Image (cartoon, rainbow, N blue to C red):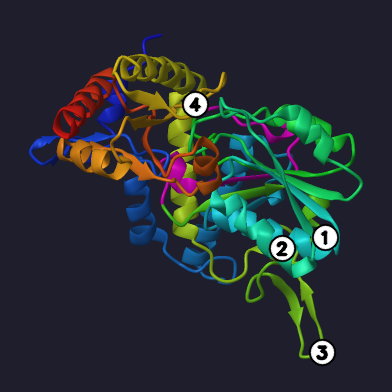
Amino acid sequence: MKFDVEKIRNDFPVLHRKVYDKPFVYLDNAATTQKPVQVIEEIERVYKTINSNIHRGVHHLSDLCTGEYENAREKVASFINANHSHEVIFTSGTTGSVNLVAFSFGESFVGEGDEIIVSAMEHHSNIVPWQMLCERKNAVLKVIPINGDGELIMEEYEKLIGPKTRLVAVVHVSNAIGTRNPVERIIEIAHKQDVPVLVDGAQSVQHEKIDVQKIDADFFAFSGHKIYGPTGTGVLYGKEKWLDRMVPWQGGGEMISNVTFQKTTYNKLPFKFEAGTPNYTGAIAMAAALDYVGKTGLENIAGYEKELTEYAVSKLMQIDGLRLIGTPRKRTSVISFMIENIHPYDAGMVIDKMGVAVRTGSHCAEPVMDFFGVRGTIRASLVFYNTKREIDTLYDAVIKVKEMFN
């Protein structure tokens, strides 16, 4: 079946605006995705018709809003194939999810001399929380190295895991170079030594079907705004056996069962980890985004994005002096590159004037940039509403950059 990209594009209002009197080409999707009208209208609907604080009210509106919030949780659980809906915790995003685990799992299971393993291609959000944990607990952070193609050196990973390893935290897809890591194998190796694994799915959940039971992830984190939902929304999936034993991350309303000045008892899952009034509007709208993706079909999306990425790489590699940063065998639609003797920021400014939005800099992955010996890159990140025509516009913009600076 032919993928109808123009039909998809009609659902995204911002794609039809102009920038500098040129058609707008948005290729910064790894930073955040644009929102379809179905999500925008869902936010409006909630505020217009059922807005009310959830779980605590006995009145009709509170009951309606609570029902939709919990229905959103059920939709997320189904989308990632969680075993139970109470294994789905709503957070502010991937960063919030990782910090929750770093604190709560760390307080419960990590002590002096214990070890946490991350990879050399992590986003800062999956590095800094573990560094903070290691400083707090006097634990040790170990790093899986990468090779010149931007792939994990799995042999070295196997050497790192030992009796002191308490958790492995690894990105599913690199936001900086697009590498798709073999998380299934990473988890399998860790589980042989009873070590749990957290997967940062911020850059994978919008590109491929996620089945947390199939990959056997202990924790899986993603952000709503990366998968066409609102900002300030996210998900932490955690296996019940871990979440039950972890201490709460934040204290306040909703996460309690009983409070006295002598002692507080905590609520059951998932509420133990959702202190305060949650972003119920965001959660309901995020579920609408998942519905939208599900209706389109992740298999259809993945097939189209693969074709688009291959076209983009082939097109860009025709440009003399253009260097791809990261050439993994398995990648998603993130393409990082340099133009010879031209600073990424300068290039990005010119590309912007051509109506094309790309990202420049270190992409919150400074260790990756250090490994490749660059200060930053130009990053084009594609999703299912992008077109080959837009790739051609990017190509023309890069040619313009070369003409101006050379």
**Local SS, label 2:** helix
Taking the magenta stretch, the answer to whether it contains residue 222 is yes
Q: Is residue 257 left or right of residue 206?
A: right
Residue 133's tag is 2
Mark 2 or mark 3: name the one nearer the start of the chain. Answer: 2
Real-space CA distance between mark 4 and mark 1, rounded to the nearest whole angstrom: 34 Å
Q: Is residue 56 above or below residue 226?
A: below
Q: Is residue 61 left or right of residue 398?
A: right
Residue 125: horizontal and vertical position, in percent?
A: 56, 53
Real-space CA distance between mark 1 and mark 2, rounded to the nearest whole angstrom: 8 Å
Residue 37: horizontal and vertical position, in percent?
A: 30, 41
Please state which of the two labelled residues, at mark 4 or mark 3, is closer to the viewer: 4
Mark 4 or mark 3: name the one nearer the start of the chain. Answer: 3
Nearer to me, 196 or 351:
351
Taking the magenta stretch, the answer to whether it contains residue 249 is no
Q: Is residue 199 above or below residue 7?
A: below
CB contact under 8 Å: marks 2 and 3:
no
Q: Is residue 231 left or right of residue 265?
A: left
Real-space CA distance between mark 4 and mark 3, rounded to the nearest whole angstrom: 52 Å
Nearer to me, 138 or 219:
138
- Residue stretch in magenta: 208-230
Crowd tier of the residue under label 3, counting other residues whose Cα lies within 10 Å: few below 14, some 14–19, many 20 or above: few
Query: Which residue position is annotated with label 4?
Result: 332
Residue 38 occupies which quadrant of the picture? top left
- Which amino acid type corresponds to the residue marked 3 in the rendered image? Gln
Query: Which residue position is annotated with label 1?
Result: 110
- Which amino acid type corresponds to the residue marked 1 in the rendered image? Val
- Which amino acid type corresponds to the residue marked 4 in the rendered image? Thr
